[in-house]
Amino acid sequence: MKVFKDKTSLRNFLEPFRAEKKSIGLVPTMGALHGGHISLVETCKKKNDICVVSIFVNPLQFNDKSDYEKYPHTPEADVELLEKARTDVLFIPDYSEMYVSNPMLKFQFGKLEAVMEGAFRPGHFSGVGIVVSKLFNIIQPTDAYFGQKDFQQVLIVKQLVKDLSYSINIHTCPTMRDTDGLAMSSRNKRLDESSRALAAELYKSLKKAADYGHRSSNVHAEQLKKIIVEHLAQYPEIVTEYVEVAHKETLDLMSGECNPEDVVMLLACYIGGVRLIDNMFVKDQQL
Ligand code: PAF
């Protein structure tokens, strides 16, 4: 695996591949890698001639300073996992390499960011938009890979690509789960033993609602939400930030009777001070 810390050397390295019309896949990450990231790398390797992984913990997308400071860092383990997955290139810049000065640019994604992560983490998606645009400009990939676990982020990135006319195919890869259903996330590394055991309840609440959706001939958004909220309410240690039922393409919040094919259920909760998110379709569940 070739490792680059500076963008000029990376650009120079990639130039001949681009000249030969090779496809370049990008897996953007913030490190503390897990099976979910590795599944993105594997998909990227299958679909592209060259697979570039970036690791950069982007301060701009953290609205909470202590969340940024506590974000897990496991650089040696990350390199080992990427080598094992036969990653071609790792781009691991430091702050000054990514941000020559503090950006003045701000992105606004309208109604796509008015709810859920955008509403509870002001400025988060502007920060994501800026760093993803920078990575797209530096690496100029033909394809980029994102996990469905960050559902709203995927829709925002697709909008960014449309709005700025990037010629990049955005691939959404399924959420990888531990055996008890917990969605893999770098933040899971911060859970203590009891919080980790409890964290599987997030998955179970979504699964219970999805099962109701499968059984019912007509699905009501309020009923889906109630099942999830009531399941989580059994555990006082789980502090729910939001539970929403939304249209899977527009993120419009749903109410009343809805077509289960159109619906995604999303939640954010704190367990032991760690913020976790997850989501699930009612139909086409990835189990
Ligand atoms: O999903 C993430 O890890 C980050 O938001 C991303 C896309 C790497 C941008 O910093």
Image (spheres, grey):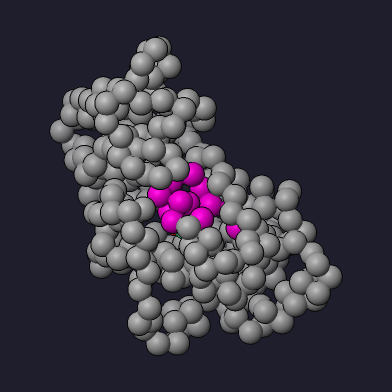
Note whether residue 208 is visible.
no
Note whether residue 3 is visible.
yes
Which image quadrant: the N terminus?
A: bottom right
**Is residue 277 rendered to the left or right of residue 283?**
left
Who's the residue at 34% across and 20% down the image? 219
- Give coordinates of residue 77: x percent, y percent: 54, 58
61 w.r.t. 255: above or below: below
**Is residue 234 rendered to the left or right of residue 59?**
left
| Quarter of image, res 269 | top left
Q: Which residues are magenta?
A: 144-158
Q: Is residue 148 magenta?
A: yes
- Nearer the observer, 115 or 77: 115
- Give coordinates of residue 4: x percent, y percent: 63, 76
Q: How many marks?
A: 0
86 w.r.t. 151: above or below: below
| Quarter of image, res 140 | bottom right
174 w.r.t. 87: above or below: above
- Nearer the observer, 79 or 185: 185
Who's the residue at 41% across and 25% down the image? 259
Who's the residue at 76% across and 72% down the image? 18
